[in-house]
Every structure is written in structure tokens, then in C-alpha cells.
Amino acid sequence: MSAADTYIVSDVHLGNRHCHLEQFGQFLDDLPAEACLVLNGDIIDEPDDPLPEADAQILRRLVAESKKRQVVWVYGNHDEEVAIDDAGEIQFVERWIVGERVLVMHGDEHDDLMPRHDLFKRLFKKLHRFCIRLGFADVHVADYAKKWGFLYRVLTKHVATKALRTATTEGYDVITCGHTHAPIDMTVEGHRYLNTGCWTETPAFVVIVHEEGVDYGPFPSTNGEVTGGREAPC
């Protein structure tokens, strides 16, 4: 790996009780000294709510990282209005380009389904909370949504299709997103779509851009590097 490596993750959801803080902290510990870090949206779950101390420590760690490496924070739909008193050297952007071939966008820009069904979202979240009270597994609402396979595949395919259309129209070889919490690696007509999943489930996925190409896979992997991937569930 070269000094110009860029590591891309998304959907950490600091403040959410399902966030795997220890694993994300280990990811930060393992970052090469010269690597750039791109946080592709929804890093904080609810920006208006105070963070528990353990989550706040991770946020402070990100600020500290920005003072020794490039840290870019791409806004997501959860943290599009995030305000940090001391953000260090973090760069806040709507999208990010790595080199000339990789476009980084959170993915909510490609989601025309969920914003049009706000009532359904509210009812679904109530159903999720009710199921937990009944004794069902206490998982993140997105993880619960995956049990509704057909509906979830419609969403993931919709976002992937629109993202690939953006990559094709704007001339990028690769587009990487988060948002759907569904790790996906798919290539259509020479354009590659990568989704980094989330840190509220395991494993989380990471994209690494380096001089030789783009790697994608779960963290951690058996050899300490990010490799492999999954095919699109659609």
C-alpha cells in the first residue's frame, strides 16, 4: 500500500446502542500512518442528542485523527446538520472524489423511495420497538428490516441502480455509498458499485483506494487487510 491510500467507511451511527464502538476503534488503530480517511455519512446517529461518553470519545478520536491525517466527512441523511464545537481539521463535504475514478456519496441522494414513504417508516419503527418489547432480538431497525427480504431488496437495488447511473453519467469507474446498511459489490457495464454496509452489524465493510486499484471487504479480515466482498442481493 502506498502513502496515498484512502480508507472509506460509512454508517457508524455513534450514539446508537447497536454501534460496535470497540470494533470501530480497532479500525482506527489499524489505519496506516499516512492513510486518508473518508467517513461516508451517518457517522452520528442523532446529531441533536448528546453522545454517551464512550461514543463521544470516538468522536474526539476522529477530531484528533484529522490533525495528523486527512479526514473527510461526507454528509449523510442522519448527520447532514451535524455541528461539532471543535471539529479539528475535518473537511465536511457533500461528496468526495478519490483520484479521478472513485466517487464517494452517502447514498441518500439516490434514494427516492424512503423519503416518499415517511408514514410507513414511522409505523415500521414502532413495529420494530414493539417486537423488541415482546422479546424478539434487540437489533438495529435496519437489521430488522432485512427480515422483510423483498422490500429490502427493492430499496438496495433502487439505490444501487441510481448510483451506477450517476457513475456512468459523470464518468467514474467506481461509486461507493452507504445508507442502505447492505454490503454490495457489483459491476455493470464496466462501472462498479460498492456499499460499505454499517457498523451497527458485523462485519462492517471497508473500501481502500490505492495506486494499484480498489479493494473492498470486511473488517477485520484474517490477514489484517481488506479483501473480498459480496455480490449484490438483488
Image (spheres, grey):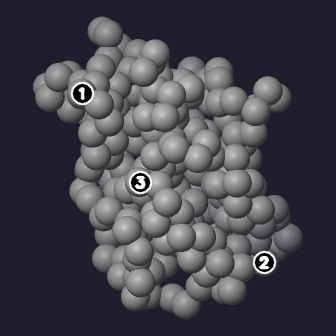
What SS does tag 2 mark?
A: helix
Residue, disc 1: 100
Tell me residue 194's x, y (percent). 46, 31
Callout 1 amino acid: Glu
What SS does tag 1 mark?
A: loop
Instruction: Residue 46: give its label.
Output: none
Q: Nearer the viewer, mark 3 or mark 2?
A: 3
- The residue lying at 65 percent from left, 21 percent from top is 228
Q: Nearer the viewer, mark 1 or mark 2?
A: 1
Mark 1 touches mark 2? (CB < 8 Å): no
Tell me residue 45's x, y (percent). 52, 72
The answer to whether residue 7 shows anywhere in this view is: yes
Specify whether 90 is left or right of 97: right
Q: Nearer the viewer, mark 1 or mark 3?
A: 3
What SS does tag 3 mark?
A: loop
In terms of depth relative to the viewer, which is nearer, 143 or 127? 143
Alpha-carbon distance for marks 3 and 2? 43 Å
Dot 1 or dot 3, earlier in sequence:
3
Which of the 4 quarters of the picture holds residue 56?
bottom right
Dot 1 or dot 2, earlier in sequence:
1
Dot 3 or dot 2, earlier in sequence:
3
